[in-house]
Amino acid sequence: MTTSRRQSTETALQDAARQVFAEKGYLNTTITDITRRAGRSAGSFYNYYDTKQQLLTALLAAFPRRIVDRALDDLGTDWRATVEAAVRAYVRTFRDYLPEMIGAFQLAMTDAEAALWWRSMRKQGIDAVLALVDSVEADGVTVDLDHGTFASAIVSMLESYCWTWLAAGGDDGPTEYDEETAVRTIATMWQRAMVGPSGP
């Protein structure tokens, strides 16, 4: 098999997996579902991956880096703008990687390796929040909260909100999902939690 054909087949399998994960969820998707959607033979899957989980891992590899890249692209000139850029990057990347996030969330409930990946992703987010807190305090503003607990809570809020509205169909009630409203609201909550409503 030529290199270009091999890459074409692997891309087709990954694209098909993303589609089927989004439609059926990771746990309900079979390898046959993926190869059928890709228009490839069932046996072709094993030329690239040993398991469905290995394919999911390959799809997830770019997720944390993509958040950082997007945040840097939108980076503002002060810490408030940086908070908003970070929230926007997370929400947009979660949206774009929704099939993978559905798979990772489902698998993490039953698989130790997937749970480790999820925690490692959370740690990157927590470290980013802590770095921002340190930056704010370096400018002379005291963040009068336990920093570790605060960072964990911010990451948890982002995860839970994105899962609820992007993967689980949203909440019952008067609110409808609007990405820009979500980004600005979450960013404002994060900002006020650090320095209060009248902070610098």
Image (cartoon, rainbow, N blue to C red):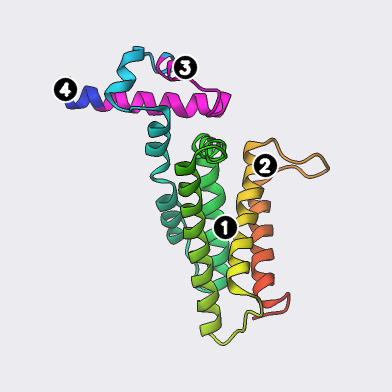
Which labelled disc corresponds to residue 7? none
Quick one: label 3, few (<14), some, or many (20+) residues within 10 Å? some
Q: CA distance from mark 4 to mark 3?
A: 25 Å
Quick one: label 2, few (<14), some, or many (20+) residues within 10 Å? some
Count of numbered circles in the view: 4
Magenta region, residue range? 7-35
Residue closest to the far right: 174
Residue position for label 3: 33
Measured as percent of width and height from the top left, residue 116 is found at 47, 49
Q: Dot 1: what SS?
A: helix
Q: Residue 186 lies in magenta, yes or no?
A: no
Q: Residue 9 lies in magenta, yes or no?
A: yes
In front: mark 1 or mark 3?
3
Residue position for label 2: 165
- Of mark 2 and mark 3, the one earlier in the sequence is 3
Contact check, label 1 and label 3, Cβ < 8 Å: no
Q: Quadrant of residue 186?
A: bottom right
Q: Identify the amino acid type marked 3.
A: Asp
Q: CA distance from mark 1 to mark 2?
A: 15 Å
Residue position for label 4: 2
Which labelled disc corresponds to residue 87? 1
Measured as percent of width and height from the top left, residue 88 is found at 56, 55
The residue depicted at 55 percent of the width and 79 percent of the height is: 136
Q: CA distance from mark 1 to mark 4?
A: 42 Å
Contact check, label 1 and label 4, Cβ < 8 Å: no
Quick one: label 1, few (<14), some, or many (20+) residues within 10 Å? many
The residue depicted at 39 percent of the width and 29 percent of the height is: 14
The residue depicted at 57 percent of the width and 49 percent of the height is: 91
Question: Is residue 180 positioned above or below 138 on the image?
Answer: above
Q: CA distance from mark 4 to mark 2?
A: 42 Å
Question: Is residue 106 positioned above or below 6 on the image?
Answer: below
